[in-house]
Image (tube, rainbow, N blue to C red):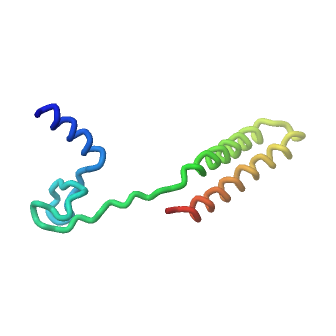
């Protein structure tokens, strides 16, 4: 019986969390329709979803921009044009991918 309770508690803890009641401040399960202490309705927690497939390209764009800035500060005059291009490419990539993430936000 004790083992079954622990197993059920572990399973349910993945799907239930304790939230604070807005009225009385007591801890309440996030799946409870109302607070058992004061009866206040519990608002469901909305989890914002962002397309994970765009996080990698944004990271790469940031790395290109940072590397471009570093190289711009350390390279000679001949290589600065290529480095400027990398910086612009990184900045443009960040802006474009952020707009795509915003557009596809669920």
Query: Residue at 12% across / 33% down in the picture?
Result: 2
Give whichever of 79, 4 is nearer the camera.
Answer: 4
Give whichever of 25, 18 is nearer the camera.
Answer: 18
The picture places residue 69, in percent across and down from the top left corner, at 72, 43
Vertical order, 12 against 37 (above or below): above
Query: Residue at 17% across / 66% down in the picture?
Result: 23
93 relative to 21 in the view: left or right = right
The picture places residue 11, in percent across and down from the top left corner, at 26, 41
Q: Quadrant of residue 96?
A: bottom right
Q: Quadrant of residue 64?
A: top right
Query: Residue at 15% across / 56% down in the picture?
Result: 26
44 relative to 27 in the view: left or right = right
Q: Quadrant of residue 20?
A: bottom left
Residue furthest top in the image? 3
The N terminus sits in image quarter: top left
The picture places residue 71, in percent across and down from the top left corner, at 76, 38
45 relative to 66 in the view: left or right = left
The picture places residue 91, in percent across and down from the top left corner, at 70, 53
Give whichever of 51, 97 is nearer the camera.
Answer: 51
């Amino acid at each position: 019986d004790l083992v079954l309770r622990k197993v059920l508690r572990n399973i349910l803890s993945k799907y239930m969390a304790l939230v604070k009641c807005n009225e009385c401040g007591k801890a309440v399960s996030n799946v409870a329709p109302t607070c058992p202490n004061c009866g206040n309705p519990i608002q469901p927690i909305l989890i914002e979803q962002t397309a994970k497939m765009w996080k990698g390209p944004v990271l790469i764009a940031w790395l290109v921009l940072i590397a471009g800035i570093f190289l711009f500060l350390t390279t000679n005059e001949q290589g600065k044009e290529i480095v400027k291009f990398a910086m612009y490419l990184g900045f443009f990539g960040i802006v474009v991918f952020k707009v795509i993430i915003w557009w596809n936000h669920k």
